[in-house]
Image: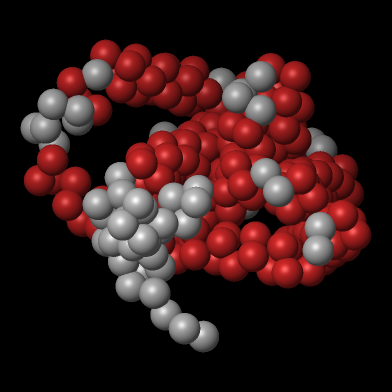
Amino acid sequence: MRARRALPGMALVVLFFTTSAASAQVSIPKLTDEVTSDFKYIVNNTAMDAEDVATAPLHIASPDSPIFSPKFYLVLAGAGALWGGSYALDQTMRSQLRSMSSSDASLLQDVSYASVSASTALLYGWGLYTNDSRAREDAITAGMGAGIASLLDLGIKPAFGRLRPYQSSSHTAFFAGGQSFVSGDVTPMFALAAGVSDYFDNQWYVAVPVFSLALLDGFGRMGFDAHWFSDVVGAALLGAGTTELLLWMHRRHAVETNRWRVFTATSPTGTLASGMPTGLGVSYSW
């Protein structure tokens, strides 16, 4: 809980300094344009995400549907194997971590929340500093992924009803009214980490540290005997998977100029040869 209280403050402090540095390099009007563009990015993609989810069953048999891609089944099999392996290690991992002191468990969570949140804030600040829209959009999408995955977790917990380790010594205690599967603390950490890693094309020298830092939160939760290892891995898959899905969807949205948008989309020059804005949408004056 202490880590949760520290998270907003840490993120705001980091974002303040990175934004201040950006302001020193970029004129205020330019900085305002970037922030306004990011706001439009959030609004437009949120609307299109909702449309995509609602209409997904109508496109399941289309030629570009994921069900016709071998990669989809490889990823699904890999995720299943990873979770299955973590389930087999539940008792072993619990025996190693349950004796951790509460101060050490809290420290692991504090380090995880502060470092992963700061990394995401720094990525957004770097995008402002260098006018790198991809950096800002990856950070924003990671935040969206963290929020959506956390909401999904609220439904997953009662659906599976798994008892926490301190409630039952059996890791098979599903559908028993519990709240253990999956970890609501770990889920947003992996969602944020996925966005940071994606900006660097998931290179190992970024992916390994940032996902390891996210995993520390899971070890902290296990130190409190509040989760099984498979709860942590399930949360990691949910968080990272949600962000990766949103990143894929948002990149498709960027090239689908015929989609409905709340704010009008423009070309790099701002208009077509005809002088009309590109894309479809509604522009509001405010």
Q: Is residue 166 left or right of residue 224?
A: left
Q: Is residue 215 left or right of residue 180?
A: right
Residue in view at x 26 percent, y 54 percent: 259
Q: Is residue 92 left or right of residue 281?
A: right
Which x, y percent locates residue 232?
57, 37
Which x, y percent locates residue 116?
74, 44
Q: Nearer the viewer, residue 4 or 66?
A: 66
Task: Say if 138 sits above or below 27 in the image.
Answer: above
Q: Nearer the viewer, residue 274 or 6?
A: 274
Residue in view at x 60 percent, y 24 percent: 201
Residue in view at x 36 percent, y 61 percent: 275
Residue in view at x 64 percent, y 65 percent: 33
Q: Quadrant of residue 255?
A: top left
**Would you say residue 202 is visible in this rendering?**
yes
Q: Quadrant of residue 37?
A: bottom right
Which x, y percent locates residue 222?
68, 40
